[in-house]
Image (cartoon, helix red, strand yellow):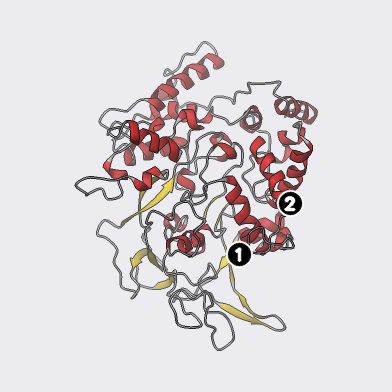
Amino acid sequence: MVPMRLIARLASAFALGGLTQCTPSSPVEDPASATEAPTNTEAQALHGHTSTGKALFSQAFPNTNGRTCATCHVLEDSTALLPEHVQARFASHPDDVLFNRIDADDPGAAVPTYEHLKKGLVRVVLSLPANMDVIDTQGQVITSPDRKISVWRGVPSIQDIALTGPLFQLDGRETNLEDQAQSAISSHSEGGLVPRAQLRQVAEFQRGEFTSGRARFVAGLMAHGVPAAQIPLPEDFMWLTPAERRGREVFKAGCEPCHGGPTLSRIVAPAMRENAAQFPVTKPDGNVLYTLVPGAGPQPVQGVRSTPDILNVGFGAFSYLGQIGQFPVLYNTTVELPRYRFRFYTDGTRQQRMTDLPPIPVTASGAPYDPIPAVDESGAPILGPNLLPQWFSTDPGRALITGDPLDFEAFDIPTLRGIARTAPYYHDNSMATLKDVVDVYSQFILPVTAPLNLPPVHPPETPNGLPESFSPAQKQDLLLFLDRL
C-alpha cells in the first residue's frame, strides 16, 4: 500500500512538472513469451518492449494494405486523426496509404473521393448482434446477407489509454489492447493474424503514451494497485491563473460529475451514476412506455443499463438533426451519414420482436419533421427514447455490440485530459471546436440533467439561442481550464 501522504506529494510534484517518469509495472507474461524481452532488469525489459512496440506501431505488418497504426493514430497529433492532417496529406500525397478505398465515400466508385475522411472520419464495419435486424421505414427487414453494417466514426487518441481502457472506437467492443490492435490490423489495414507477442508489444507502447506527467502519475498508481478512490486529482495541485481557477469551479459543477475521478472519464457522483444507468423502456413500435403517476401525469418507464459509463447523452439525436438540416452548427453536416432503423428481438432466433428503433415519428401536425409529437389517449407524448421525432439513426453505438435497446446510441465517456488538442469531438466528429462543445452542453444537455441542478438561468448568447446553464464568462473560464488539461 502506497502511503497517502506520499501519493499527495507525488501528485503535487507531477502537477508542477517536477517529475516526468512514473512507469507502470510490466504485465505478467505467460511462459511461452518469457524469452521475448531482455531479462537483465524489469526496467530494461519494459524499455525494450516499448521501443519495439513503437516501431511495430509505426510500420506496416506483412500482407496488409500498407497502413500502419500510426497512419490513423498520428503520433505528431496526439495520436488522433485530425481533419487538417488528412486534408494536407491529400493535397500533397493523394496516393498515400491513408487514402485506401475502404475509407472512400463510395469504395466502388471509378474515381474515389474522400470527403468523409477529410472530416477525420473512417468507415467502421461491424456485425449485427444475433438478435438485431436492419429494417426500412415500412418495417420490412433489409439486413444484408453478411449481416454487417458500416458507420462513420472519428479516430480517438490512444494517449492515456492506460487510464481509460481499450474501449475501441468508443463502444467498448474489445476487452484488451491486444485484441484492439488485432481488430484494427484486420479491418483498417486489411491484414491477417499477427503473432500475439507482437500485439503485446504494440499494446505496451500504447499504454506508455500519455497527455501529461499528471496522467502518467495516475496510471502508475493504478498499475501498482492503488484504488482510484485513493488517488488524488493532480489537477488539484496545479498552479492556475485566477480565470483558470474560476474555470476549475465551473468544471467541478458541470463536467466533473461525469468526467470525474483521477482518470477524468468516470461518473463519480452517485446521483449521476443512477441517472446514467437509466434509459427509457420502449414498446414494440419503438415509442416510450409511460406510466401514469398521480399528480405528475405520464412518466416514462426507465430501464436499468449495465454500463453507466457508456451512455446516450443525445449526440446521436443531434447527428440526426444535423443530417436533416435542423442543427447546422455541426461540423459534419456536409457529408452524408448512414440512415438506419433497427429491430431488436428477444433472442438470436429473431422470432419475437422486442422493439424497433428509432420509431416512425408521430407528430402533432402530421408533417414529417414537426418537432412537436402527437400524444396518446392518456396524454403521453408519442416519442422514441431520444424524446424527439427521429426518422433514422446514423450510428446505434453500444447497442450494436450488446443487442440491448437500452444501449441505443450510447458511447463511452472519454477522458478530458488533452482534450484541447484532439478536435473535432464526439464519435462522429460532429463538433468542430471545444467552444462548440461547451455551447451545446450549456444550452441542451446541462439544463435537462436534473442531478446537476444547473438550470438555464443565463440569457442566450446568440439571438436565436436558448437560455443557458453557463454565462459567457463562465464558459470562457471553463475553456481556459480545459486547455490546461
Amino acid tagged 1: Asn
- The quarter of the picture where the C terminus appears is top right
Residue drawn at point x = 58 percent, y = 81 percent: 380
Location of residue 274 by image quarter: bottom right
Q: N-terminal of the two: label 2 or label 1?
A: 2
Question: Where is residue 429 shown, x and y percent of the image?
Answer: 47, 48
Q: Residue 235: image x %, image y %? A: 72, 35
The local crowd at label 1, few if under 14, some if 14 to 19, many if 20 or more residues have their Cα within 10 Å, is few
Residue 435: give x, y in percent of width and height.
Answer: 60, 48
Residue displayed at 60% across by 56% down: 440
Nearer to me, 211 or 1: 211
Residue depicted at 50% across the width and 55% down the height: 330
Looking at the picture, does residue 264 appear above or below residue 15?
A: below
Quarter of the image containing the N terminus?
top right
Q: Identify the residue position indicated by label 2 in the image.
A: 253
Q: Residue furthest bottom?
A: 377
Q: Is residue 213 left or right of residue 169?
A: right
Check the image and report above or below for 449 versus 18: below
Q: Nearer the viewer, residue 438 or 91?
A: 91
> For this rendering, which residue is in front, 161 or 256?
256
Instruction: Name which residue lies at 71% across and 21% down.
Output: 18
**Which residue is identified by label 1?**
464
